[in-house]
Structures are given as structure tokens and as C-alpha cells.
Amino acid sequence: MERASISVITTTKGGPIDMLAASLYPYYDQIHEFIVVNANSHKRAFSKLYKYPKVKMLPGKGTNRSEGKNIGIKAATGNVLAFLDDDVRVTEEWVNALKKAMLHANIVAGWSPPLMGKEKPRVSIYIDGQDITYPTCNIAYRKEVFDKVGLFDAALRGAEDIDFNKRCVDDGYTIIYDPRVKVYHRHRKGWGLAEQAYRYGYSRRLFNKKYPELKHAHYHGLSLTNCVSLGFGALGYCFGGIFFTHR
């Protein structure tokens, strides 16, 4: 396959994007561009980004994460589109490991352990033996995948990465998991975790409505944290349409 020319894409509403940019800075000579879709109206939060090379700031006020990703996809000029959340920190091996993995793959999902604390068990969904729940906090696709599969479904409001991975698998693509493609992710705690679980619950409801055959295909790891998250997720599943914050 063609060597990877990496466009890094993230959508932010005021998260610690400057810290992500700083963690990427030592490796800017190894990436093609860093696209940041600003879904926040407060420009001051992003003023520090202008000192970094290869940063493209795109307006996206009022957009949700799916729409922001789609804006980034349309603007990207690299042949590999790597999606990162605005609260991750890339590791020293991330770029080189991703480039090596993309020599033999169309889709590579990386490892995203927490900055602090223990890693939570995954809540997986398997299609043809492939886990489709690898999130866009650390995953890369060759641009040709979007040419064939299309863009993210903005109507799903949070499960758009699961939906897109399913469509990729349905179209014959294989998702390769490579733990060497590693970033550290700032996992939420306390009320932030509960609010996230609530939103995820509603997102899963929308996903299950689109794919009713997968309603009982979720595999939950057991832990106290997961049980609490599942409780708030259940509330979001039932009542998210009333209280859901569009993101």
C-alpha cells in the first residue's frame, strides 16, 4: 500500500486542545497536517494553536462531533485520516507505529489507556468476529474508505463511530487493532462520567433503532465502575431524548 501521509483530525468545544497540540509537536515533521474543527464560539481558547506548524483551524460553531469529523474529512489532503479526541496525549511511538500499521491495513484502531487510574472493560459489539466499537479517540482510516463508505452519520449524536465501523465491516473492510498505536486518554470521573454514560446510553438507543438486529449484541465487562456507568446509560437510553445535550 501507499505510504501513509497522515492528516490528524479532531473536533473540540473548548477541551485541552493546546495540550494535544503540544504532545504532537515533536512529531510534526512526520505528519501531513493537523486539522482542528472549532465547534466553540470562543476563539480565545484556541489562540495558542497558531504557534504550531501544520495546524488548520476550521470553523464549525454549533456542530456536533459527527459533523465536525465530516468537516475535517472534506478538508483533509493526506491519504490517511487519523482521528483523536481533544483530551488525548500521543505517545512517542504513536506516529511511527501508525505509519507501519497502515502499510498493510485500511483501518487501524489504537490503544487508549487512561492518563490516570485503571482501564475500564470494553462494551463491545461484534460483527463477523470484528469489534466495531473502537472509538474515534484513536483510530485511523485510509481516505479511500470514506470514498466508498461515506461520511459519519450525524444523526446518531455519539455512536457515529460504531455505526461507521459497522458500515466499513459490511463493505468488506477489516479493522486492525494495534496497541503500539498508543495515546493516553483523559477518562472522566464522578459526575462527568455519569453525564458521559447518560449521553452514551441515548446514543446506543439511536444506534439500536437504526440496527434493531444488534440490540442484544452488546458485551459488557463487569466492574463496579461499569455497573454505575450502565445505570446512567440506562437512564440516557430511556430519557435521553428529553434531556440530551447535543454534542
Image (spheres, rainbow, N blue to C red):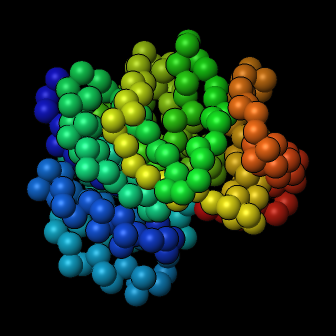
Q: Residue furthest front?
A: 117
Point out the image quarter for the N terminus: top left
The answer to whether 6 appears left or right of 209 in the picture is left
**Of all residues shown, which one is farthest toward the bottom?**
44
Query: What is the quadrant of residue 103 in the picture?
Result: top left
Q: Residue 94: horizontal and vertical position, in percent?
A: 28, 45
Question: Which image quadrant: the C terminus?
Answer: bottom right
Placement of 62 over or under 28, stated as above or below: below
Residue at the image point whose x is 25% and y is 30% from the top:
102
Residue at the image point whose x is 39% and y is 24% from the top? 176
Q: Of 201 and 70, which appears nearest the observer?
A: 201
Q: Residue at the location (24% across, 21% down)?
A: 104
Q: Is residue 59 visible?
A: yes
Does residue 57 sit above or below 113 in this rendering? below
Q: Residue 215 at what x, y percent from top left?
A: 77, 26
Query: What residue occupies the far top of the structure in this picture?
Result: 128
